[in-house]
Amino acid sequence: MQASEARYRELVENSQDLICTHDLEGNLLFVNQAAAIIFGYSSEALAQMNLRDLLPPKLRPLADVYLTEIRTQGCAAGVMQVRTAGGETRYLDYRNSLQQKGSTEPVAYSVARDITARIQAEAAMRVSQAQVTGIIAAAMDAIITTDAEQRIVIFNPAAEAMFGCSQTEACGQPLDRFIPARFRASHRLHIQRFAQTGVSARKIGQFGPVYGLRADGVEFPIEASISKIHVAGQDLFTVILRDVSAREQAAQALRRQLDTLHSLYQITALISQTEAVTEVYTVVLDSLHSVLIADRSAIVLLDAAGVARFGPGGLSTRIAAPLPAISPGRSMTLRPNPS
């Protein structure tokens, strides 16, 4: 019995868990070395204290709730917030049971584990998740996350606006829904190859233009980048998209302006090199026709008598033939000759 008790005491004292006993009033009767280290008091000092002394002042009324539970149920378990001698807050996951031997007063035996690090990590994770959620929600670019099967799990407000589809409707749907049909096979192949590489992020569209498909069936040019992470045993792919329609339109407008300037340069060069009117107005007409992207074009010439007539140009004979002369300043409507 003495040897057994010695082994028991050795196990209790060397345990990394907090082990203590207390009476039904909350008075501590015994604490092991781990408890003394956590609380910052000596074992002797703790043995003279009450459970309430180890709780933050605002939580001390909860000690009565706990003691009632241990009296009536014979056991209690949960997470307890305690305060150390230095004023630090820590969290203990405890499992207590009430035992009575012979005629002695019942005693609560308690085993607790310090889970402060886990609680703090969970709190930090919740803050981080809230920050990420806020960033995704406020992002001006569309952000879409899919699982390994390319089914949508995140669809932010910018994506809703870009594709004209609500998050509720999009989540669970295949990403193919928002890709033009002619690009779907190559996109799936691209994702499969990307998943097999050790690369964590990549720009999409290095080998050709990329287009999105709105809910109303309209295609539009986009810029996109993709990244992957491994969470809970599965790969998640996040695509960040930007609608570049306005930029493409601006680029087209700039190209047209450059074409206009080039045409004007050609016209100026030609005028400076020739005196033949027919050569000049033919080149001018061709250049303006191209720059303005007109369906039809023609030049009207004034003869010596001041009569305006169509000169050679882009009008068909069926349109120009019925109008041998035009008075300057007169508006007109051109119609093909039925004959």
Image (tube, rainbow, N blue to C red):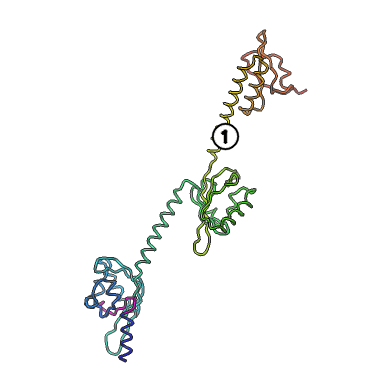
Q: Is residue 17 left or right of residue 278?
A: left
Answer above or below: position of 102 versus 320: below
| Residue pictured at 32% horizontal, 70% vertical | 80
**In the foreground, 95 or 8:** 8
Where is the C terminus found, in terms of image quarters? top right
**In the foreground, 253 or 322:** 253
- Residue 145 is situated, as x and y percent measured from the top left of the image, at 52, 54
The image quarter containing residue 100 is: bottom left
Q: Is residue 176 left or right of residue 144?
A: right
All told, the count of numbered labels is 1
The image quarter containing residue 36 is: bottom left
> In the image as oriented, which residue stretches furthest toward the right?
339
| Residue pictured at 53% horizontal, 41% vertical | 244
| Residue pictured at 67% horizontal, 20% vertical | 282
> In the image as oriented, which residue stretches furthest toward the bottom?
1
**In the foreground, 329 or 253:** 253
- Residue 39 is situated, as x and y percent measured from the top left of the image, at 27, 71
Q: Which residues are magenta?
A: 14-26
* Residue 208 included in the magenta stretch of the image: no
Residue on which disc 1 sits: 252
> In the image as oriented, which residue stretches furthest toward the top?
305
* Residue 23 included in the magenta stretch of the image: yes
In the rendered structure, which amino acid carries the disc numbered 1? Gln
> SS at mark 1?
helix
Instruction: Using a 10 Å C-alpha cutoff, classify the residue at mark 1 as few (fewer than 14 neighbours), some (14 to 19) or many (20 or more).
Output: few
- Residue 320 is situated, as x and y percent measured from the top left of the image, at 71, 20
